[in-house]
Amino acid sequence: MPQTELDGEQPFLSHLVELRDRLLKAIAAVLVLFLGLAFYANPIYSYLAGPLLQHLPAGTQMIAIEVASPFLTPFKLTLVVALFLAVPFVLYQAWAFIAPGLYRHERRMVLPLLLSSTILFYCGVAFAYYVVLPLVFGFLTTAAPVGVTVMTDITQYLDFILTIFFAFGICFEVPIATILLIWSGVVSREALVDKRPYVIVLAFFVGAVLTPPDVVSQTLLAVPMWLLFELGLWFSRFFKPGEEQDEEPGLLSDQGVAPAETVVPPNPDDR
């Protein structure tokens, strides 16, 4: 095999090996957290079910309609919690893998955005748990018709709240998406300001699609999305769109050093 083909294959294989190692580290971190939290699977589920249990009618409780759900559902939640807690480490492994291939200004941009996006996702989940779910369950449990007892299955409840958490966590990334769109030059800040009415309508449409069919949860998702969009517009003033790439190292003219003057040999006829 020619030497050039070997040189091309070796870096590719080394990247695959590094990717495999970082994926294994991320999976190992999730498994370690899961094993540490598995003993507390039932208390974790009880804590997560708190917003619903507080609004259930007196004398009612949650039910399990499947044979294995009392055992499997808390462990499923524990695995999700382990993944949730391992997100910073997983994102660090992704950052460490892609950072060597980025330009200097891209590294300065990606790391703060990565950290802020993680914090915003956590804030979205916390907002959903402490603000949205109590209001939603307070509305839904009182809206039941006469003669209907609210008794929710534990598996369906877990799927419901995980959907809510994911929806609010993703929607809280609106500032990061706004900044990236402006920084990459896809759209200008002025164009987004002009399209503000459409963004507000889109926020309420997304809230209607991702949340239960009640006005409370739709509004609690749409209004923060709109406010976070305004926050992204404000922070986008500090990011210059279409920044130029770093210069190639080793070129004197690119490093700001003036090229040496050309020495012209003397003409014998001038003597």
Image (cartoon, helix red, strand yellow):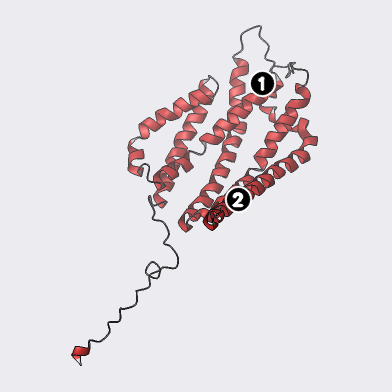
Q: Residue 57 at x, y = what percent?
A: 69, 16
Q: Residue 88 at x, y = what percent?
A: 62, 46
- Which quadrant of the figure has residue 148? top right
Q: Dot 1: few (<14), some (14–19), or many (≥20) neighbours within 10 Å?
A: few
Furthest-left residue in view?
Answer: 269
The foreground one among 166 and 226 is 166
| Residue found at x 70% / y 39% | 82
| Residue found at x 74% / y 33% | 44
The foreground one among 220 and 110 is 110
Residue with the mark numbered 2: 13
Residue with the mark numbered 1: 156
Furthest-front residue in view?
Answer: 1
In this picture, residue 241 sits left or right of residue 9: left
Q: Residue 45 at x, y = what percent?
A: 73, 29
- Which quadrant of the figure has residue 197? top left
Furthest-right residue in view?
Answer: 39
- Which quadrant of the figure has residue 24? top right
Of labels 1 and 2, the one closer to you: 2
The foreground one among 211 and 88 is 88
| Residue found at x 54% / y 58% | 3
Q: CA distance from mark 1 to mark 2?
A: 44 Å
Residue 121, above or below 62: below
